[in-house]
Image (cartoon, rainbow, N blue to C red):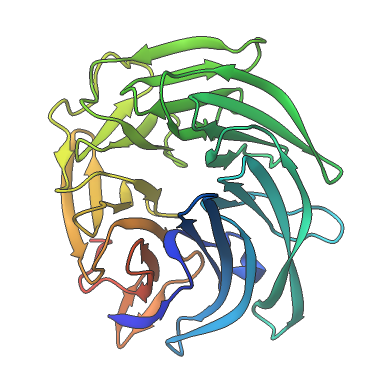
């Protein structure tokens, strides 16, 4: 069921619902536009929306012009005093920028976000920042770079500091993800097809493991399960979604994995239902996938975008009510057609 749609001002590559209770209604979308010529430039913007599931409304809050963005992520914890959500931006100019979401008066159940203010920002590399992920305490971030390096950056009293940086891969590093349950571990994946894990307690970071055989093309995304400390998923240009047990990384749990008909660019675990993930499949739209052990199945597909499927996320909080059927709210975006859609699945994905 369609709830709302919008054409953004640039090529859309990421959408992120705010994960904090008073701001569940706030949706951020980011864009990237390459201006070709003698002096090429990369521009972008972050657009904020208010998503009202019950009213079926998608309302513009703000646009923030910036450099071309490859990835955005909300902090998993609130900035203390006054307790605002933070949005991290990884961009093509080699910058990491942190924005603070300001809130207006509450209506009793939620805050209506009234805009982002830049809290801090620093150039961390001469290479492009391709991906970003917060650790579970929101005190540091892992950033993947276009030269194959990964940077670990701390956020301390509105200041960014590089804690560690090392050459992790041979080519572009599209995936860098903290272990949710063990934040001293960081997983990385790259166009060199290598899937790696690093221990941050050593400096330079120690390589815990590296799998060079499972992925036949570049790795696009890595997502640790928030509910199972041993389960991790990877997505690749080879169109496979792979499920791993981090206690045994010589091969995936299901060696044949599941082919989704397009490069698996993004994986989002459902916020409260274990074994349910939303995937952006590049040339084959979006898929909701259910897994249990080595059993994996696609329970719903969404193909109403006309271009590369890049951004996807679940809205947190209570599910929306469509007639008598409960259904989660999902936001998706696609690149060249610049489309943002907010929708609910046709079937009952929780069964």
Residue 101, placed above or below residue 87: below
Q: Which residue is drawn at the image coordinates 41% and 24% (left, top)?
A: 171
In the foreground, 31 or 265:
31
User: Going by the picture, which residue comes out furthest to the front?
Assistant: 38
- Give left or right: position of 120 versus 29: right
**In which quarter of the view is residue 327 placed?**
bottom left
Q: Picture coordinates of residue 121 (x, y %)?
A: 75, 47
Q: Count the marks: how many? A: 0
User: For the N terminus, which image quadrant?
Assistant: bottom left
The location of residue 209, given as percent across then percent down, is 42, 12
Quarter of the C terminus within the rendering: bottom left
Residue 204 x, y percent position in the rendering: 64, 10
Residue at image location 31% in from the left, 23% down from the top: 193
Question: With respect to residue 326, does 41 lie above or below?
Answer: above
**Viewer-side residue, 217 vs 276:** 217
The residue that appears at 36% across and 47% down in the rendered structure is 267
Please indicate, yes or no, whether residue 300 appears anywhere in the rendered image. yes
Is residue 314 in view? no
Seen in the picture, residue 83 relative to 206 is either above or below; the reply is below
Is 229 on the left or on the right of 193, as rendered? right
Name the residue at 47% across, 42% down.
Answer: 226
Q: Residue 38's x, y, as percent?
A: 51, 50
């Amino acid at each position: 069921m369609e709830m709302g749609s919008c054409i953004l001002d640039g090529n859309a590559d990421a959408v992120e619902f705010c994960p904090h209770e008073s701001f569940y209604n706030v949706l951020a979308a980011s864009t990237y536009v390459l201006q070709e010529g003698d002096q090429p430039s990369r521009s972008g913007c972050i657009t904020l929306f208010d998503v009202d599931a019950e009213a079926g409304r998608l309302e513009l809050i703000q646009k923030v012009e910036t450099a071309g963005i490859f990835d955005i992520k909300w902090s998993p914890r609130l900035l203390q005093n006054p307790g605002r959500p933070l949005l991290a931006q990884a961009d093509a100019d080699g910058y990491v920028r942190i924005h603070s979401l300001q809130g207006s008066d509450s209506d009793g159940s939620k805050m209506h976000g009234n805009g982002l203010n830049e809290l801090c920002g620093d150039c961390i590399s001469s290479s492009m920042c391709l991906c970003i992920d917060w650790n579970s305490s929101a005190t540091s971030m892992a950033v993947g770079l276009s030269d194959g390096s990964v940077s670990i950056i701390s956020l301390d009293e509105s200041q960014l500091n590089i804690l560690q940086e090392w050459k992790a891969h041979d080519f572009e590093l599209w995936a860098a993800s903290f272990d949710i349950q063990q934040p001293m571990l960081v997983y990385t994946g790259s166009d060199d097809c290598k899937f790696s894990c690093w221990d941050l307690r050593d400096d330079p970071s120690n390589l815990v493991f590296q799998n060079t055989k499972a992925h036949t093309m570049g790795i696009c995304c890595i997502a640790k399960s928030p509910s199972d400390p041993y389960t991790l998923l990877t997505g690749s240009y080879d169109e496979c979604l792979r499920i791993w047990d981090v206690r045994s990384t010589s091969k995936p749990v299901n060696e044949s994995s599941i082919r989704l008909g397009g490069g698996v660019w993004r994986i989002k675990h459902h916020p409260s239902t274990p074994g349910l993930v939303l995937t952006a499949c590049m040339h084959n739209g979006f898929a909701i996938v259910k897994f249990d052990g080595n059993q994996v199945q696609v329970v719903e597909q969404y193909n109403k975008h006309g271009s590369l499927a890049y951004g996807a996320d679940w809205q947190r909080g209570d599910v929306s009510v469509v007639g008598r059927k409960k259904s989660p709210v999902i936001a998706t975006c696609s690149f060249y057609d610049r489309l943002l859609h907010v929708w609910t699945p046709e079937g009952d994905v929780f069964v």
